[in-house]
Image: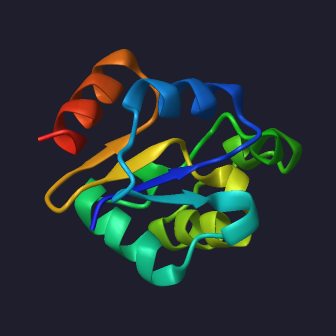
Amino acid sequence: MRTIFYLETCKTCQKALEFLAPSSDIELVEIKSKGISEKALDHMAKLAGSYEALFSRRAVLYRQRNLAEKTLSEHDYRSLILEHYTFLKRPVVVTERAIFIGNAKAVLDSAKQALHQ
């Protein structure tokens, strides 16, 4: 299954989706309205190698909660992402064999290639 996790109101995600041009067989998961299931998050973390790799330190809540001053564990990263969608780095593109996290040009180029093979 090929899936893209994104935030509809995020201009960066909108640009990424336009660039990726996903076909109709790719599942689009809008994380604010649909949320992120534990199963999906665990699968993403397995592909990424950690929950920390999926965690966004740019989230407003990260600063508001002074999380930079705390030592977070993998369990903490998982719990925070499940608690609030804003903690997921985005977009996240998941294919059968790989995961692409974030909006860096090289990441999006690789994701697009993987999606359109």
**Residue at the (65%, 60%) spot, across then down:** 31
Towards the viewer: 60 or 3: 3
At 71% from the left and 51% from the top, the residue drawn is: 86
**Residue pictured at 27% horizontal, 68% vertical:** 1
Q: Nearer the viewer, residue 117 or 41?
A: 117
Q: Dividing the picture into quarters, in which one does residue 46 lie?
A: bottom left
Locate residue 17, reporting x and y percent.
Answer: 50, 34
What residue occupies the far top of the structure in this picture? 105
- Quarter holding the C terminus? top left
Horizontal and vertical percent position of residue 85 = 69, 59
Q: Give the left or right position of residue 116, taking residue 8 as reference.
A: left
Foreground residue among 26 and 86: 26
Count of numbered circles in the view: 0
Residue 8 placement (x, y as % from top left): 70, 44
What's the coloring here?
A: rainbow
Horizontal side of residue 51 vs 25, given as left or right: right
**Residue furthest toward the right?**
64
27 left or right of 71? Answer: left
Residue that lies at the very extreme toward the bottom in this rendered image: 39
Image height of 69 relative to 96, above or below? above
Q: Is residue 111 above or below residue 99?
A: above
Q: What residue is rendered at 45% in x and 35% in y?
A: 102
Q: Residue furthest front?
A: 24
Q: Determine whether 88 is above or below 77 in the image.
A: above
Question: How far across and how far down the image is residue 68, in percent?
Answer: 68, 41
Residue 47: name its quadrant. Answer: bottom left
